[in-house]
Amino acid sequence: DVKVTQSSRYLVKRTGEKVFLECVQDMDHENMFWYRQDPGLGLRLIYFSYDVKMKEKGDIPEGYSVSREKKERFSLILESASTNQTSMYLCASRTTGTGEDTQYFGPGTRLTVL
Amino acid sequence: AQKVTQAQTEISVVEKEDVTLDCVYETRDTTYYLFWYKQPPSGELVFLIRRNSFDEQNEISGRYSWNFQKSTSSFNFTITASQVVDSAVYFCALFPYNQGGKLIFGQGTELSVKP
């Protein structure tokens, strides 16, 4: 079974803090994704990575950065957290092998910024 | 435009009722995948099914069945004899093959199954 893990299920941070959200997958998937989920807005793509050290902006990258130094790990960084970044953050990974193309999701991190 | 519409925001049924969740999509691509995911209260999105655009065969898995119709751009999901454990938010998603790997999600349908 594919396993995607996220470092925290719940996180509370203060405005202005630097926040790291970590995501690890154990299936040697090339692609990894970060989404945020908000009521009424659905899932929105923040950043994704095709492979190690590669990254692409998604639909709402402002206020975020990412890091992918190793294939299994994709980090989302909030340089200076703000209250409007309070949200549910979901990580996903995907292989690009023939017949696949399914994104598998982690359990999510509920981040509250006070 | 690439878009997924789940017109039903919330559905409430009583246990053992059958329920159908609607999904309509728009895409210019001829090659694409369609997905359904389940998000229980715990928050994790659980993959349920993937369908590619060349395979219009309906699929049944236990109490779950999916009806894919390209003529109406729909990929509907039916739960037969619903159970309380089916209560969740269900997302339909589109993966157009030439759009850089991005999934396009619908807004989700919240299903509540009452005992």
Image (cartoon, coloured by chain):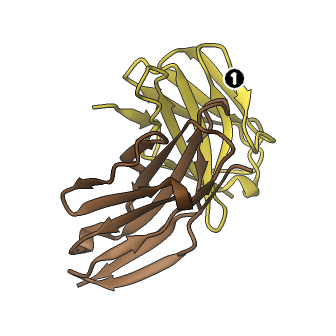
Q: Which hue is chain B drawn in? A: brown
- Quarter of the figure that contains the C terminus of chain A: bottom right
- Looking at this view, is B41 or B112 the one in front? B112
* Residue that badge 1 annotates: A55
Name the spot of residue B106 as percent of width and height, x first. 58, 59
Q: Is residue B86 left or right of residue A58?
A: left
Image vertical order of residue A61 relative to residue A84, above or below: above
- In the displayed structure, B10 sits above or below A108; it is below
List the single residue furthest toward the front.
Answer: B71
Residue at the (52%, 39%) spot, across then down: A91
SS of the residue under disc 1: loop
Q: How far across and down, in percent of the image, does residue B23 sit?
A: 51, 63
Residue in the picture at 57% in, 73% down? B7
Q: Quadrant of the N terminus of chain A?
A: top left
The answer to whether residue A94 is left or right of residue B66 is right
Does residue A61 sit above or below A15 in this rendering? above
Residue A87: x %, y % from top left: 62, 55
Q: Is residue B19 left or right of residue B62?
A: right
Residue shown at 48%/31% (left/top)? A93
In screen coordinates, is B15 left or right of A90?
left
Callout 1 amino acid: Lys
**Quarter of the image where one finds residue A66:** top right
Question: Callout 1: 10 Å neighbours few (<14), some, many (20+)?
Answer: some
Q: Colour of chain A?
A: yellow
